[in-house]
Image: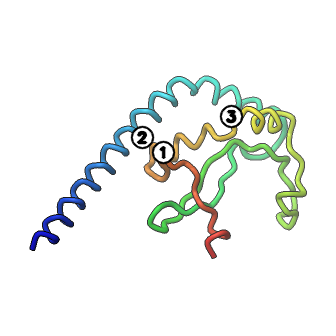
Amino acid sequence: MRSVRRCQFFGRASAARDQMRRLADLTIAGVLLMVFLPLMVLVALTIRCEGPGPIFERQACIRRGGRRFQMLKFRTLVPEPEPTVPIWARKTTQIGEFLRYSRLESLPQLFNVLRGEMSLVDPEGSSPSFLE
């Protein structure tokens, strides 16, 4: 009988810990977005002026629990007209090289954190191809 109570207690502690982690994620991501939003707008305008193509890249990832989501990043590669070109064969843009070096390409992931798809504690999502 005691083991059942113990399991119920740990279940509540785990749920409380998840709620605290989510609250911390929302608070920190909200503050970081307010601080970095002007920089993100400047980066988006620079990407748009550098050439055609989308501002953001979307990468399919799997979060905890096996649910899929689209992770956002700033576009760092030259868009290819043919989708058959492998990603490793594509060229990086001039701003893309700087974004990768400074790791600013990952700033849009704060939106994924706000939506609850990612956590600041464990930000890297797993690619579905690695799990299959």
Q: Earlier in the sequence, mark 1 or mark 2?
A: 2
Q: Earlier in the sequence, mark 1 or mark 3?
A: 3
Q: Is residue 122 left or right of residue 87?
A: left
Q: Where is residue 81? Give x, y as percent.
A: 87, 58
Looking at numbered disc 3 in the image, what kind of residue is underneath it?
Leu
Q: Where is residue 125? Give x, y as percent.
A: 57, 56
Q: Looking at the image, which residue is at 54% across and 59% down? A: 69
Asked whether disc 1 touches disc 2, contact meaning CB atoms under 8 Å apart, the reply is yes
Determine crowd level at label 1: few under 14, some 14-19, many 20+ residues with C-alpha closer than 10 A. Answer: few
Q: How has the structure been colored for display?
A: rainbow
Q: Is residue 88 left or right of residue 16?
A: right
Image quarter of residue 5: bottom left
Q: Looking at the image, which residue is at 88% across and 63% down? A: 85
Q: Earlier in the sequence, mark 2 or mark 3?
A: 2
Q: Determine the secondary structure under disc 2.
A: helix
Q: Which residue is mark 3?
A: 104
Asked whether disc 2 touches disc 3, contact meaning CB atoms under 8 Å apart, the reply is no
Q: Which residue is mark 1?
A: 121
